[in-house]
Amino acid sequence: MFKNFFEKLRKLDWMLVVSALVLLSLGLAAIYSVSLSQEDPDFSNFKKQITFAVIGFVIFFIVSFTNYSIYRVYGKLMYLSTAILLILVLFTGSIVRGTKGWFSLFGLNFQPVELAKIVLIIMLARFFSNRLARFKISKHIIVSLAITVSFVFLVMLQPDLGSSLVLFGTWFLLIIMTGIPKKYLIVMLILFVLVSVVAWQFFLVDYQQQRILVFLDPSLDPLGSGYNVTQSMIAIGSGQFFGRGLGFGSQSQLKFIPESQTDFVFAVIAEELGFLGVLLVLGFWSLIFYRLILIAKKAPDDFGMFLVLGVICVLFIHIFVNIGMNMGIMPVTGISLPFLSYGGSFLIITLVLIGIAESVAVRR
């Protein structure tokens, strides 16, 4: 038993684990720094994040040592259970920042949409791996899209535009990775534009439309959504090369940066650690993606390969959109930065995603 345990422990991709730990440490440093800015410093978020990190790593090792093939067997059950949770949260969930997508249990909040990201990866990996040998493009696209849209529709009812984009983007990137012809991509892009128009008219609420309009022209709301992005960009620029030092960033310490521990934690890191800190963050994320790509290439089967590719897609979308909105090149959608943003359920889910990849790595 112990021999088997240590054998699996040895087979883990430790470069992946260490990279995640470094990024998590940078995130904790940023959360601690922001806590210092209060007149009466409150380190409760910092302590909670450490607690969630410990819980997350325990779950990470459990997931890593679990045979990933089990997800293929119970994929449909997980999909149905998650859909039920997404429906229940619409009736019994708590409203946080205009979104009714949180379950509150014993003082802790949990977003079922975070679980939906994992389950969608499993279902799409299951679907694609079962049909690679008898690939029929039109049916392939329509059925996999239907699997995705059912989750996207329920999430949009909350409404949570950011998570909906992550779910839809994961499907889109994975469908590209299956190697479909360009003509199908063009048709899909046209349909996406049409769906976006419909969503604008019937699904997006006023504040979400305002965020998109302000993204196109920040002067429309200089003291609201436009203010958030403007202050974030000022913070990133003021960090220069070496940064102002942890706890000495004027924008973050004087509370000019909104949601500085969650949506705009990248701006805090850029201001206080400078360009070197940004390079460190991007460097370790590049290393994580490199190791994940290697694991996907060496996966024992197509299901394992698509699982890891799905993990890459979810993490990439989160990073691209979050850093983009911090720099003013993407609309503010409330998408967190993996390992760096404050948030217990999201941190645990991120570690589960890495654990799923490690499960494939252990059995390659």
Image (tube, rainbow, N blue to C red):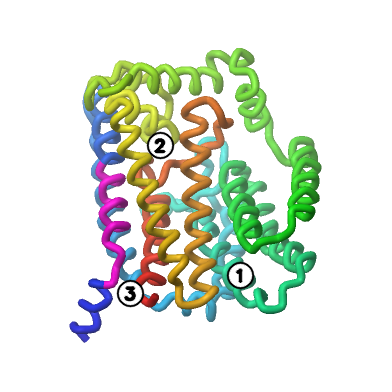
Tell me the quarter of the image containing the N terminus. bottom left
Local secondary structure at mark 2: loop
Q: Which mark is residue 65?
A: 3
- Frontmost residue, 298 versus 260: 298
Q: Nearer the viewer, mark 2 or mark 3?
A: 3
Q: CA distance from mark 2 to mark 3?
A: 30 Å
- Judge left or right: residue 258 versus residue 45: right
Instruction: Decide: few, some or many residues near mark 3? Use Cα within 10 Å; few <14, some 14-19, many ≥20.
Output: some
Residue linked to disc 1: 80
Where does the image place residue 153, in percent across and percent down from the top left?
69, 52
Tell me the quarter of the image containing the C terminus. bottom left
Q: Label 3 is placed on what type of residue?
A: Phe
Local secondary structure at mark 3: helix
Residue 48 visible in rendering: no
Where does the image place residue 58, in percent across and percent down from the top left?
28, 64
Mark 1 and mark 2 lie on one chain; the one further toward the N terminus is 1
Where does the image place residue 187, in percent across and percent down from the top left?
80, 50
Q: Which mark is residue 262?
A: 2
User: Is residue 24 within the magenta segment?
Assistant: yes
- Judge left or right: residue 59 versus residue 315: left
Residue at image x 34%, y 73%? 362
Which range is magenta?
Answer: 11-25
Local secondary structure at mark 1: helix
Q: CA distance from mark 1 to mark 2?
A: 30 Å
Where does the image place residue 189, in percent across and percent down from the top left?
75, 46
Residue at image x 60%, y 74%? 129
- Frontmost residue, 70 versus 285: 285
User: Is residue 122 within the magenta segment?
Assistant: no
Res 249 → quadrant: top left
Q: Nearer the viewer, mark 1 or mark 2?
A: 2
